[in-house]
Image (cartoon, rainbow, N blue to C red):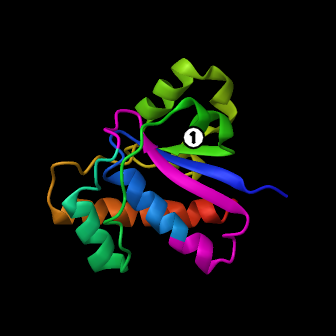
């Protein structure tokens, strides 16, 4: 059986999607599902090889003990979309941007909150870029809660 590829997408691939990728990686391993899934992150407007933001690196290390300092941004590309079994994006706008170019991917592109079946006041995961440590910490906490819900659906 081939591994199912999950793709996490945000804007620049330096904050939300690398944190999501790292948290998913930890949880998938803890649940013994790492032989069933492969995963990566990318950005719709990423600058190839940009590092994760200092705040994202710090929050992941301090709050979760996960080192993402070697992360380098990747631009979302055709192969990513075609190869993915599931594409989880941070915002409705990210979803629409993908579907504008790849309408055939409609059945596999979801926002994190939609796939986790979370209905709150904001359907998007807020972008912490340019904000302080506490905003990143809240963002990572929200992502972790969503990933836990998503894991239960895989």
Viewer-side residue, 61 vs 116? 61
In the rendered image, which quarter contains the N terminus?
bottom right
Q: Is residue 2 visible?
A: yes
Over which residues does the magenta segment extend? 26-48
Residue at image point 31% right, 66% down: 69
**SS at mark 1 in the image:** strand
**Image position, residue 68 (x, y; %):** 35, 66
Crowding at mark 1 (Cα within 10 Å: few <14, some 14-19, many 20+): many
Viewer-side residue, 113 vs 19? 19
Residue 106 falls in image quadrant: top right
Residue pointed to by mark 1: 110
**Image position, residue 96 (x, y; %):** 49, 26
Q: Is residue 51 magenta?
A: no
In-image side of 107 versus 110 (left or right): right
- Above/below status of 64 relative to 144: below
**Image position, residue 3 (x, y; %):** 74, 57
Q: Is residue 46 magenta?
A: yes
Residue at image point 66% right, 51% down: 5
In the rendered image, which quarter contains the C terminus?
bottom right
- Above/below status of 101 relative to 12: above
Q: Is residue 90 visible?
A: no
**Image position, residue 141 (x, y; %):** 36, 66
Residue at image point 31% right, 53% down: 15
Viewer-side residue, 98 vs 69? 69
- Above/below status of 24 relative to 67: above
Q: How many marks?
A: 1
């Amino acid at each position: 059986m081939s591994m199912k590829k999950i793709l996490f997408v945000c804007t620049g691939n330096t904050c939300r999607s690398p944190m999501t990728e790292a948290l998913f990686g930890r949880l998938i391993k803890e649940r013994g599902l790492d032989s069933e899934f492969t995963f990566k992150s990318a950005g719709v407007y990423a600058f190839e090889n940009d590092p994760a933001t200092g705040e994202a690196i710090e929050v992941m290390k301090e709050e979760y003990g996960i080192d993402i300092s070697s992360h380098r941004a990747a631009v979302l590309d055709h192969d990513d979309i075609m190869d993915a079994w599931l594409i989880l994006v941070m915002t409705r706008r990210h979803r629409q941007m993908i579907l504008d170019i790849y309408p055939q991917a409609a059945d596999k592109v979801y926002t994190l909150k939609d796939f986790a079946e979370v209905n709150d006041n904001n359907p998007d995961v807020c972008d912490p870029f340019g904000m302080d440590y506490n905003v990143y910490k809240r963002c990572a906490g929200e992502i972790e809660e969503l990933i836990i819900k998503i894991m239960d659906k895989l």
